[in-house]
């Protein structure tokens, strides 16, 4: 018997939800119509009390688990979502939406602006993490869910999770921010900016109006290559590539990739441009850089009176979102008197660890969700009595 | 009285040395004629025993100290070289040459190939750290110097220093490798490669044949921006920029630099392309990546029987050339029985520390050179007696 198949969700499908009354954004601009791509796994219980929202990272999408018809690879967090897994679909109703500004089905710069009949391009309004969450809220309301059992995500997914914690605390019973930060450091902004400059340096970017004409593949590929370095660690790169040459001897041209690590990065860059929109990359990285829920105030203030339980996770070798940033969040939550558990996982995978250290995460998250579930049942019994 | 002027070398000049019998390279290709740009400070003593060779980093040049006529800024290591400084020009004869493959006066890809009458471009042969040092040796021989009192340099300068230690140990009485490595890790190769891909992604690069037609400014600027992130540290960026916006409020276009750190990087990128050749950037970063003096052997083997004294320095916050890489060099030197002193300097400046922590370096290097000088005098007296 195939054990993997047992715990797999099997074939899943991305669906779409449109609210045509539009969405007012943090920038005061308005999107006249918004479509959200989403997937759900498991069943919503009668009391609508078992819903968990999964938030994806920069280049993720709504397809978090299971297989799309014909695909060989499952969704990006399949190891974590399914029957008997951390986000156990036998117990929980798991939701994942592509973020606003994205390019995987949700309204973003590559979509047609209903007003002009042409793709938005750089005319798409500035998007923030707050806007992403506001759009998600509309969907949660549409489902009639008053309170999510949990919100969870790594990296940018962690930022969205923090946004829920800071600004919609009564809508969640718990939150699991992973490998994230309450605001980008200048080094993180700098990495984002180099990626953006690489995209915009490509003449095929054409100020963002490239749809149907060209695509800034070279620039976006460079941005992705850089991203990949920051997602791994010195150690994980050494283990994976060492100083090995690519098979086949020295390349014909002296500046072609020669080391295995160069070939790998080039391959990752070239694959990425086939699936991701360059403008979405610009908009979403800007959202990351501007994220700052405390906005100058002490972070503890935005968590004051918080009832939701928090499990915060970071990874020792993550130098893009170093542990000290999660520890700052945990400190603020503690100052605010919140129920917070923190774990730094030993891992050599760098930032990618949040996608790879699923065994450790399963252990932590599984138990945490059980505790949250019990506490919520008790609470609902108390309210009835 | 101006104290700075006192310890300054005042006006200096770059000079040129050409050997027209050419240079056979590690790749077996041959350069038919080689010009080296150099500067010297202080005077060579009668016995030609007080010469110190300073090796520059990736984008450095022969102008290590003093002022060029009309310039407001001195050479790149002026704090370290001059009367009474670490490399005391009252005592030592200090030499600095622009590396082979460079673009600051020494033969490189932007020079005219005497065979074709056109700039080399990508037809310039592959250059290695070994070749750079081989060219320097020709100049040292020309000066009639049989043994350098010391060779010193940071980053790529440290690699050249290691090359002297490994393959010309009898030509040096001592060596000072700083913030360097005996071979690039895959992470370091990856950063190099992203920079190169950024350059080559620029259509103005034209396969390297852009001279007189165009210049890949956008690509080279992106490469330099990335470089700058790796030269600083998370902490030094936080101290220097925080999350401050550039003065003047939000930019007119949403993807223009907004944070101070973005403006700074863009400025550094744009300044760089005015002074540095894109092909030189490709050639020299390749030389860094291929550097591996041990070539699969234990590093200690290449240092066997070494008589030269070594002072190795690294910096705690340097994550581009982390201390463990210098410690690997020190370990190998110790196994080989060499006279090696190692110091890790506490600094928040990251890799840039080798240019900035001059007070600490002055202390260490000043004393080290004195010890080497005394030991060499004793040695030469013993030989006479």
Image (cartoon, coloured by chain):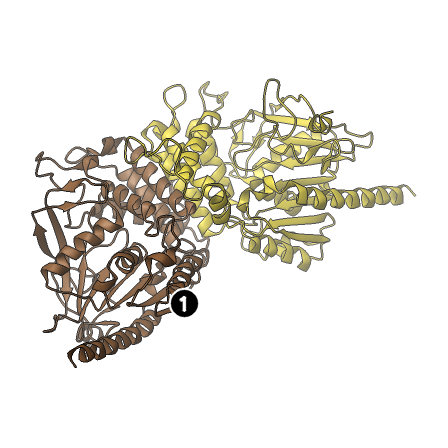
Chain colours: A brown, B yellow
Q: Quick one: SS at disc 1?
A: strand
- The answer to whether A115 is drawn above or below residue A285 in the figure is above
Outermost residue to the bottom:
A385
Q: Which residue lies furthest to the right in this view?
A: B385
Identify the residue shown where x is 72% and y is 42%. B172
Q: Residue at x 22, y 37 (%)?
A: A215
Between A162 and B368, the one nearer to me in the picture = A162
Which residue position is annotated with label 1?
A345
The quarter of the image holding the C terminus of chain A is bottom left
Q: Mark 1 lies on which chain?
A: A
Q: In which quarter of the image is the N terminus of chain A?
A: bottom left
The answer to whether residue A131 is above or below residue B282 is below
Does the rendering let one see residue B149? yes
- Which residue: 13% across, 37% down? A119
> Would you identify the image quadrant in which residue A32 lies?
top left
Residue B370 horizontal/vertical position (percent): 78, 43
């Amino acid at each position: 018997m195939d054990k993997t198949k047992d715990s797999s969700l099997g074939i899943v499908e991305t669906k779409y939800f449109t609210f045509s009354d539009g969405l007012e954004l943090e920038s005061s601009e308005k999107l006249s119509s918004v479509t959200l791509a989403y997937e759900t796994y498991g069943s919503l219980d009668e009391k609508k009390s078992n819903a968990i929202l999964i938030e994806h990272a920069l280049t993720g999408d709504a397809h978090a688990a299971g297989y799309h018809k014909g695909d060989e690879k499952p969704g990006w967090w399949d190891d974590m979502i399914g029957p008997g897994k951390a986000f156990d679909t036998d117990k929980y109703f798991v939701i994942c939406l592509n973020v606003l500004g994205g390019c995987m089905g949700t309204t973003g710069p590559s979509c047609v602006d209903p007003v002009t009949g042409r793709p938005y391009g750089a005319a798409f309004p500035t998007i923030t993490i707050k806007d992403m969450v506001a759009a998600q809220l509309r969907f949660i309301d549409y489902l009639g869910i008053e309170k999510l059992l949990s919100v969870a995500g790594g990296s940018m997914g962690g930022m969205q999770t923090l946004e829920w914690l800071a600004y919609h605390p009564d809508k969640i019973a718990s939150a699991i921010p992973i490998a994230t930060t309450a605001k980008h450091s200048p080094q993180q902004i700098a990495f984002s900016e180099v990626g953006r400059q690489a995209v915009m340096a490509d003449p095929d970017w054409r100020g963002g109006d490239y749809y149907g004409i060209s695509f800034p593949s070279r620039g976006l590929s460079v941005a992705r290559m850089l991203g990949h370095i920051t997602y791994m660690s010195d150690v994980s790169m050494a283990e994976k590539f060492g100083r090995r040459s690519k098979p086949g001897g020295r390349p014909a041209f002296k500046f072609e990739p020669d080391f295995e690590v160069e070939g790998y990065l080039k391959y990752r860059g070239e694959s990425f441009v086939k699936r991701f929109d360059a403008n979405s990359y610009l908009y979403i990285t800007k959202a990351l850089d501007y994220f700052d829920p405390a906005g100058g105030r002490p972070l503890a203030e935005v968590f004051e009176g918080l009832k939701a339980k928090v499990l915060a996770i970071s990874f020792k070798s993550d130098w893009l979102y170093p542990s000290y940033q999660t520890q700052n969040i945990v400190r603020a939550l503690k100052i605010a008197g919140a129920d917070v558990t923190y774990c730094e996982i030993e891992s050599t995978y760098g930032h990618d660890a949040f996608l790879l250290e699923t065994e450790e995460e399963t252990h932590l998250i599984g138990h945490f969700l059980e505790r949250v579930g019990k506490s919520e049942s008790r609470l609902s019994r108390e309210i009835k009595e």
